Amino acid sequence: MSLTIEERLLQMRQEEEELRFSTFDSETALQLGLILIDEARLTGKKITVDITRGGHRLFLHAMEGTSPENEDWIRRKNNTVGRFAKSSWHTALMFRSEGRTLSDDYGLSDNEFVLAGGAFPLLIAGEGPVGTITVSGLPDQEDHDLVTAGIRRFLNEARS
């Protein structure tokens, strides 16, 4: 069963409320990054992962089969999260549903921003967004699903 855009937008708002860290440092980034790589390996996917906090890249890994182009997608996805304070896929679907574009409605360049899935705001309880957790290499929905599944797995393992 396929979700409507409205159902997906609701789901993404819920994810952005749920998928928050109590703390986040370099060690957290390493563990989360390795989980995201593991999630990709389990499904035979090839991705590049970037985790950045406050402009400081804490984790970057490009799996075999990816290219430098993936890092450019990550940069533009991260810019989109930074500008709109929600996941890049959430922003993309919201824009589609409202008939808006980055250039016409915000004057933003496609060279710097992109409406594509895969970047999720790094959210810390009590602080709000402080960075990004980003995957590139798959179709939009798959990039988004992989990053949220990896964050959820990390948070569940941390609670156990």
Image (cartoon, rainbow, N blue to C red):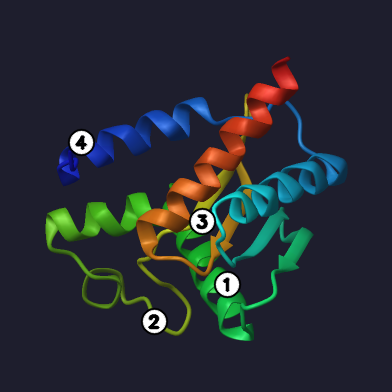
Residue located beneath label 2 in the image: 109
Amino acid under disc 4: Glu
As drawn, the residue found furthest toward the right would be 27
Crowding near the residue tagged with mark 3, few <14, some 14–19, many ≥20 C-alpha atoms within 10 Å: many
Helix, strand, or loop for circle 1? helix
Q: On residue 119, which mark appears?
A: 3
Q: Residue at 71% x, 24% y: name it.
A: 157
Q: Position of residue 68 (x, y in %)?
A: 63, 84
Question: Where is the C terminus found, in terms of image quarters?
Answer: top right
Residue located beneath label 1 in the image: 75
Amino acid under disc 1: Arg
Vertical arrangement, residue 17 with respect to residue 122, above or below:
above
Helix, strand, or loop for circle 2? loop
Query: Which of marks 2 and 4 precedes in the sequence?
Result: 4
Crowding near the residue tagged with mark 4, few <14, some 14–19, many ≥20 C-alpha atoms within 10 Å: few
Do the numbered discs 2 and 3 sit on residues whose CB atoms are within 8 Å?
no
Vertical arrangement, residue 11 with respect to residue 131, above or below:
above
- In front: 138, or 26? 138
Residue depth check, mark 2 versus mark 3: number of the one nearer the observer: 3
- In front: 118, or 46? 46
Q: CA distance from mark 2 to mark 1?
A: 13 Å
Residue located beneath label 4 in the image: 7
- In front: 53, or 19? 19
